[in-house]
Amino acid sequence: MLNWREIRHEVLRRDNRCCQVCGKEHSGQVHHVTPRSQGGTDELSNLMTLCGKCHMLISPVPEWLITKLWGIPSNEISAASQAVQTQVDKIINK
Ligand SMILES: [Zn+2]
């Protein structure tokens, strides 16, 4: 049984540390496609590498924080978030 640190390392290795949404290299965030709160597991099939920006866009964080960190105007956040989510769904359903 792998611990989270090992699982995370394995996901990053599998994805070559590239964000699976925008392709950014040296990305280090591991996203649960189905959130643990909704019964998602730590199986590799439920995990993908994302960059900090893409990950934050589909995480429950306040909009002002996204604007502050990534310079995305608040009126563009929901469209940007939708675009990331669509891409994640596409990857999972392939
Ligand atoms: Zn990205």
Image (cartoon, rainbow, N blue to C red):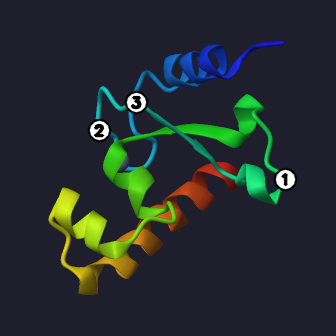
Residue 94 shows up from this direction: no
Q: Residue at x 21, y 57 (%)?
A: 69
Callout 1: few (<14), some (14-19), or many (20+) C-alpha neighbours within 10 Å? few
Give the Cα distance between marks 3 and 1: 23 Å
- Ligand 1 within 8 Å of the CB at mark 2: yes
Quadrant in which the N terminus is drawn = top right
The percent position of residue 13, horizontal first and vertical second, equals: 51, 16
In the image, residue 3 sits, relative to residue 38, either above or below, namely above
In the image, residue 62 sits, relative to residue 54, either above or below, namely below
Give the Cα distance between marks 1 and 2: 28 Å
The percent position of residue 42, horizontal first and vertical second, equals: 75, 34
Residue 17 shows up from this direction: yes
Numbered disc 3: secondary structure: loop
Callout 3: few (<14), some (14-19), or many (20+) C-alpha neighbours within 10 Å? some
Q: Specify the farthest residue to the left.
A: 71
Numbered disc 1: secondary structure: loop
Q: Which residue is mark 1?
A: 39
2 and 3 marks in contact (CB < 8 Å): no
The percent position of residue 79, horizontal first and vertical second, equals: 37, 79
Q: What amino acid is found at the position of numbered circle 1 in the picture?
A: Gly
> What number is the disc on residue 28?
3
